[in-house]
């Protein structure tokens, strides 16, 4: 059984057309039970219908926040590596704020993300 996408579908009508045209993709998530958040996952799941248009020719930045040591983020790092490999997108940088609960550390990560972003102006 097929289900039609509603005409007011924001992902299909706004996000994916912009993503197809983009040279740089920024994937942002918090750590949720060792994986990405549901909102980002829902968008990524919609890539499938546009694989041909999305494959190759893009760079990707990942911004990840959460709480835990490096092992807590291992599955997420692997997920993004596999996703970028599959999409044939070039990794262009990552900011991993594994200590985002700490305001001082978080401020450093915000600065790190801003510096990364300035590379693409």
Image (cartoon, helix red, strand yellow):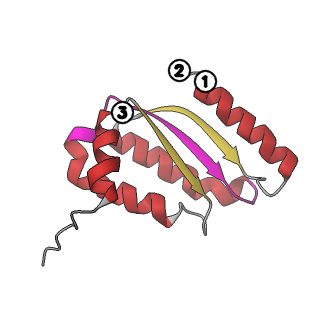
Residue at the image point whose x is 78% and y is 53% from the top:
99
The secondary element bearing badge 3 is classed as: loop
Q: Is residue 113 above or below residue 4?
A: above
Residue extending furthest toward the bottom: 1
**Residue 93 x/y as whole percent:** 57, 33
Q: Is residue 65 left or right of residue 12?
A: right
Front residue of 27/10: it is 10
Quick check: is 66 in the magenta stretch? yes
Mark 1 vs mark 2, CA separation in Å = 6 Å
Mark 3–mark 1 CB contact (< 8 Å)? no
The secondary element bearing badge 2 is classed as: loop
Q: Which residues are magenta?
A: 53-69
Mark 3 vs mark 1, CA separation in Å = 17 Å
The numbered disc on residue 65 is none
Q: Is residue 81 left or right of residue 5?
A: right
**Residue 19 x/y as whole percent:** 34, 41
Residue at the image point whose x is 29% and y is 61% from the top:
9
Q: Which residue is mark 1?
A: 118
């Amino acid at each position: 059984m097929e289900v039609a996408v509603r005409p007011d579908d924001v992902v299909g009508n706004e996000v994916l057309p912009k993503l197809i045209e983009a040279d740089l993709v920024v994937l942002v998530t918090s750590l949720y039970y060792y994986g990405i958040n549901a909102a980002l996952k829902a968008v990524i799941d919609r890539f499938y219908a546009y694989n041909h248009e999305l494959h190759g020719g893009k760079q990707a930045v990942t911004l990840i926040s959460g709480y835990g040591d490096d092992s807590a983020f291992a599955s997420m790092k692997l997920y993004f590596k596999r996703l970028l490999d599959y999409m044939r997108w070039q990794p262009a940088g990552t900011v991993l704020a594994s200590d985002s609960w700490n305001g001082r550390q978080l401020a450093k990560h915000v600065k790190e993300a801003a510096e990364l972003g300035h590379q693409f102006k």
